[in-house]
Amino acid sequence: MDYFSFGFLKDWIMTIDMTKYYNLFMTTGGIYVLWILAHFVASHLYVQLCTPLSVFGVLASPFLIASPHCQSLRWVIYEAGSKVSIMWGLLAGWVLGKIKTD
């Protein structure tokens, strides 16, 4: 009982203009992926460099908070999180627009 034909799926995929979708992804989704990657990397670096898990880390914390590398990592974390939140809203609006017009 074969209800699904993989030949049909292959033929349907071959009719799609992949360059159009690739360009769309690279101009919109590529930026999204870069912000997610920046947030991920900055979050992990902040934990490693600015909040050491030790008694020394507790004592050094007031000095590390004001250091330039910790401030810049906090900026990247905040800005990347903000951009990703905005992009979720844009994605929701785009999907709703597609649903409304189709």
Image (spheres, rainbow, N blue to C red):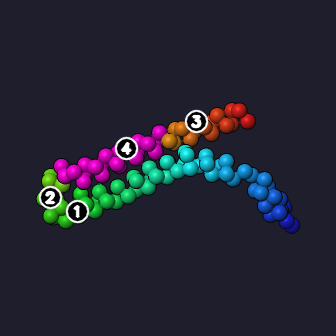
Q: Amino acid at mark 4?
A: Glu
The magenta region covers: 66-86
Mark 1 sits on what residue? 52
**Which mark is first along the chain, 3 or 1?**
1
Determine the CA span between mark 1 and mark 3: 41 Å
Determine the CA span between mark 1 and mark 2: 9 Å
**Which mark is first along the chain, 2 or 3?**
2
Marking on residue 93? 3
Which residue is outermost to the right? Answer: 1
| Image side of residue 95 versus residue 42, left or right | right
Mark 4 sits on what residue? 79
Tag 4, which secondary structure? helix
Query: Which image quarter is the N terminus in?
Result: bottom right
Magenta stretch, main secondary structure, is: helix
In terms of image quadrants, where is residue 96? top right
Mark 2 sits on what residue? 60
Determine the CA span between mark 1 and mark 4: 23 Å
Query: Which image quarter is the C terminus in?
Result: top right
Determine the CA span between mark 3 and mark 2: 45 Å
Alpha-carbon neighbours of circle 3 within 10 Å: few (<14), some, or many (≥20)? few
Q: Amino acid at mark 3?
A: Gly
**Which mark is first along the chain, 2 or 1?**
1
